[in-house]
Amino acid sequence: VITLTTDFGLSNWFVGTMKGVIAGIAPEAQVIDVCHEVPPGDIRAAAFVLAASLPFFPEGSIHVAVVDPGVGSARRPIAIRTNRAIYVGPDNGIFAAALKTESVAEIRELTNARYFLPTLSATFHGRDLFAPVAAHLSRGVPMSKLGPKKDDLVCLDWPETSLSEGRVEGQVIYIDRFGNAITNIPAATLSNLGKPAQELHVWKGKKRLCGIAPFYAAVPRGQTLAVCGSTGCLEVSVNGGDARKVLGLRIGSRITVVALNPEA
Amino acid sequence: VITLTTDFGLSNWFVGTMKGVIAGIAPEAQVIDVCHEVPPGDIRAAAFVLAASLPFFPEGSIHVAVVDPGVGSARRPIAIRTNRAIYVGPDNGIFAAALKTESVAEIRELTNARYFLPTLSATFHGRDLFAPVAAHLSRGVPMSKLGPKKDDLVCLDWPETSLSEGRVEGQVIYIDRFGNAITNIPAATLSNLGKPAQELHVWKGKKRLCGIAPFYAAVPRGQTLAVCGSTGCLEVSVNGGDARKVLGLRIGSRITVVALNPEA
Amino acid sequence: VITLTTDFGLSNWFVGTMKGVIAGIAPEAQVIDVCHEVPPGDIRAAAFVLAASLPFFPEGSIHVAVVDPGVGSARRPIAIRTNRAIYVGPDNGIFAAALKTESVAEIRELTNARYFLPTLSATFHGRDLFAPVAAHLSRGVPMSKLGPKKDDLVCLDWPETSLSEGRVEGQVIYIDRFGNAITNIPAATLSNLGKPAQELHVWKGKKRLCGIAPFYAAVPRGQTLAVCGSTGCLEVSVNGGDARKVLGLRIGSRITVVALNPEA
């Protein structure tokens, strides 16, 4: 399995062309689109998409990700092998979130042009470099042939959550098609607040939004709720509605979960 | 063949993740996207899409459809086996239109967690339940292992056409990307009007729109026409234009086909 | 490999249904989407997409393209065999640009209904005619069975570039998702100007836009540049920005590349 994640969109021929290149080198590879609508150039959004989806792919998959505003410049193309999979893309932090739960075995800078297309364009390394390298890897070309070893990766500025007594603070990191606002607060963190979920309260800045519900339809239509979403993170939603519009949530909006002190 | 129809859109990782789950369980399955841009939560639109497309898939296909506003609530996940195919999705009427021309052999409620992902989220049963069940079915797991038999299905409120002397009344049920307004009036019904197609007239409410043409380009550019479209239903179009914009057609707009009485 | 390029968009079931038809006839075929968001009815845009992408597909591929405003009328459905591939679609010029670099071996008009679906709709030949013909071709049906030989193809009105002393004139023919404006000026032409690329200047009408840079990130963020893009043609861009918005570029905008005369 080779997966593809890009910011190319589907209104052009870019993704299809990458698949044509792969089909020419590795006809037997199964290519799966993860997402091609990452906001253009948004490495952090891409990192989030990869972390949310890749754990559900089979072991041994090869994951190509191309959100690459530095294409053609000195940013280095890399391949990363972990205990679970191989990652192919630019060294710009795009894999940072996905790698958090895996152990990195080997990093290679992609310098061996033998595994690229014969002509390398200045603007489309997804087609000319990353797709052919992934296709060759799927056919059994060893990492060691791709280029020199590297010891480190470019870091990604990733928003952290903070946990203090009785509260967890985080922010919105993704808003999906339905208007659900996904935060960076892992649902598992909430157990540290020392209260059952139904006694927790979710705030946006200084405004209380809602409590935590087990699923969308657990509250009446049009009502705000927070759920432990499918990414494992807390998600602020409006049942049958659009939390972005109704609550004015945006990427970066501060969200706090508070365990109300019954003595207070 | 496993087909996927959802309202997830393509701007996120949801559909790709379902494919990752299927690839892990049934690597040899061929997965085909039918449509992922069903309007969010619109079960009737999904039912129409399924009825228009699934007859063109090979016998024995497994059709997964997830437009599921009740995810996580008491709505039941089901699998339906007919003489032609297997359907997997929520029991909310989504398959009603597709099943009209098939005979149902067996309905199972999906309760056996052995065929789900190990952890079932509250919000993404497409990934955690429907995709893995479909993958297991494609590998030969029998329906009987999935859960208890069911005898009935949730009904869908579906607009019917009415045929009275000299007229058929229906409504617009889908507007495609080109602005063609597809009605629920089966082209076959028109022969009941007792006139050849070229003598029939199409009205929107009290306004005559056009006659019936054999294909789009049979009328001059910019002119309104109705054709027997590829779904088998009557379709109101503007050749080279957008019937939605030009004629103000909407989902639910009333369309009448009348055989003008020559004596009148 | 069978590729699909259409103006159907992805918000409906049209493309999925074509794949269902192919899966029923040629289950072993690998179907790859090139692009389905060609602007509705824009044959020239489709021709450009095909020319930019198809050379990257393996030899022997079957390329189906359906941008077909004349569907159902007298326009002829055809298959074209070249030294590299087979092309299937309407005879409306859609393959003109892709065929420029190939030699045509055989053209057939598709008239043999034995290779169509049993019922041919008036509006969806992608599903009823082109998809099944491509699927049969992939299974080894010879071109000669599809219909009578044809000697000519409908031409396409394609904008040419003009090269005069010290200047190349062309126009914008595609604007991608990032707002990069792709022109019809082949990068190779620029060497005829007798100056190194870094001494060339790019004008929009009477306004100088920028010089030529080796890649996007070679200029500061927000600055205009021109690059030899991945299609082999000159592309006007804003690093990290949207050239369409910033520079007011449109399809058809006149672009000139000038070698400034140092004596002037």
Image (cartoon, coloured by chain):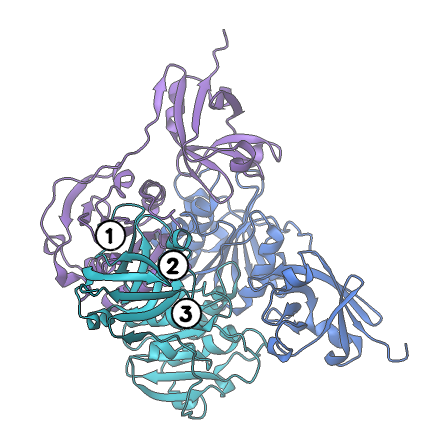
Chain colours: A purple, B blue, C cyan
Q: Does residue A122 appear in this view?
A: yes
Q: In the rendered view, does B86 fall on the left or right side of A145?
A: right
Badge 3 amino acid = Leu
- Residue under label 2: C176
Q: In the rendered view, does C150 fall on the left or right side of A110?
A: right
Residue toward you, B230 or A252: A252
Crowdedness near tag 3: few (<14), some (14–19) or many (≥20) residues, C-alpha within 10 Å: many
Q: Which chain does the residue under circle 1 lie in?
A: A
Residue C66, position as x, y percentages in the image:
47, 73
Badge 2 amino acid = Asp
Residue toward you, C171 or C215: C171
Q: In the rendered view, does A156 fall on the left or right side of A53?
A: left
Displayed quadrant of residue A246: top right
Exactly how many numbered labels are in the figure? Answer: 3
Residue toward you, B48 or B173: B173
Residue B6, position as x, y percentages in the image:
51, 52
Residue toward you, B68 or B250: B250
Q: Both on one chain, marks 1 and 3?
A: no
**Which labelled disc corresponds to residue A71?**
1
- Residue under label 3: C4
Q: Both on one chain, marks 2 and 3?
A: yes
Q: CA distance from mark 2 to mark 1?
A: 16 Å
Q: Does residue A87 appear in this view?
A: no
